Image: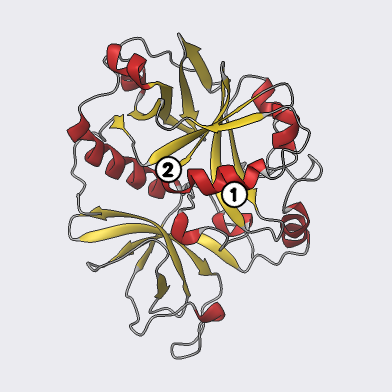
């Protein structure tokens, strides 16, 4: 990230690095129930849903924020992985009456920080108990358990007409501030560089209500359930303060305390960076080989920062 954060209120605005998939048809919820890690019954109550879409080997292909829009269930995910995710999902449609389409060029994604920003213009404000509201085709959803952040999605033309889209020049700062808020919330994301690298628990999705262990079978469920019930969670998502450098999502890192892993999210803060990284939980003596060859030639003096939830036992 080239932009830096300031002490100003986080910027609300367009998030063009996100794209959208729409699922429509009478079998939408049953189809998704067999594909994602969380219970789609939540969507039928009019609430948003966080879930992982995984490979049969249990590796996360995409982290999806699913919204119960009036035109169909809409999934928010990084634009760079929309098409490969769409192509993979379509292979499993078979006889299900569900249509999956990329609507990234028709709809837009806006990030809003604070209730006042969410209530701007004609945006509805979701009730705390429900988490999603919609008016005139513009949907607003709370982001996870974060009471102060909201997704806003809708037809791009409508968002412009309602004065919600904001100036294009605001997109860079809005993206930066959104990434930083995700990092500080411990909210995971998967990009092209990290697809199929991690089991859902490595991204802490079991700790932030992104997995249902009672819903029944779904793609990757056997591996995810085995990981949970056998207690084989050896890597977790951590928040770090990184020194100045040339960092990239997916980059392997080897920390001075002996832990190693890969960066999953980055945002510059002054001369330094904040990051999320999947790291092995147990430290190893400096000089020992890192697991899965996730090491770099230089040890990084990164500081671990707190997350808003407990990681729990390994």
Helix, strand, or loop for circle 2?
Answer: helix
Q: For the point 49% across and 18% down, which residue is it?
A: 126
Q: For the point 53% across and 58% down, which residue is it?
A: 195
Residue under circle 2? 79
Q: Is residue 208 visible?
A: no
Classify 10 Å Cα crowding around label 2: few (below 14), some (14-19), many (20 and above).
some
Report the front residue among 245 and 15. 15
Q: In this view, does 314 lie above or below 106?
A: below
**Label 1 to label 2: alpha-carbon separation:** 21 Å
Report the front residue among 16 and 244. 16
- The colour style of the image is secondary structure
Q: Is residue 79 visible?
A: yes
Classify 10 Å Cα crowding around label 1: few (below 14), some (14-19), many (20 and above).
many
Q: Indicate the position of residue 108 as horizontal and vertical percent values.
A: 38, 28
Residue under circle 1? 205
Q: Nearer the viewer, mark 1 or mark 2?
A: 2
Report the front residue among 8 and 205. 205
């Amino acid at each position: 990230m080239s932009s830096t954060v300031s002490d100003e209120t986080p910027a609300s605005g367009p998030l063009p690095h996100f794209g959208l998939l729409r699922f429509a048809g009478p079998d939408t919820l049953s189809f998704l129930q067999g594909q994602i890690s969380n219970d789609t019954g939540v969507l039928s109550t009019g609430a948003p849903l966080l879930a992982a879409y995984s490979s049969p080997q249990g590796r996360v292909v995409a982290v999806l924020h699913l919204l119960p829009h009036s035109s169909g269930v809409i999934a928010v995910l990084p634009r760079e992985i929309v098409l490969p995710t769409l192509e993979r999902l379509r292979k499993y449609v078979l006889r299900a009456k569900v249509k999956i389409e990329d609507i990234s060029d028709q709809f837009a994604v806006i990030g809003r920080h604070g209730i006042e920003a969410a209530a701007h213009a004609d945006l509805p404000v979701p009730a705390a108990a429900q988490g999603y509201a919609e008016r005139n085709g513009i949907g607003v959803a709370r982001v996870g358990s974060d009471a102060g952040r909201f997704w806003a999605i809708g037809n791009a033309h409508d968002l412009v007409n309602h004065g919600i889209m904001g100036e294009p020049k605001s997109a860079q700062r809005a993206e930066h501030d959104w990434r930083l808020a995700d990092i500080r919330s411990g909210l995971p994301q998967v990009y092209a560089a990290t697809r199929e690298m991690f089991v859902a628990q490595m991204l802490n999705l079991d700790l932030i209500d992104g997995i249902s262990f009672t819903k029944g079978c779904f793609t990757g469920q056997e591996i995810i359930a085995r990981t949970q019930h056998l207690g084989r969670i050896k890597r977790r998502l951590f928040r770090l303060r990184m020194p100045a450098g040339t960092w990239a999502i997916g980059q392997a890192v080897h920390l001075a305390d002996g832990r190693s892993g890969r960066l999953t999210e980055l945002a510059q803060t002054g001369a330094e960076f904040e990051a999320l990284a999947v790291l092995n939980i147990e430290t190893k003596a400096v000089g020992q080989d890192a697991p899965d060859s996730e090491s770099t030639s230089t040890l990084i003096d990164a500081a671990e920062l707190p997350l808003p939830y407990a990681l729990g036992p390994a």
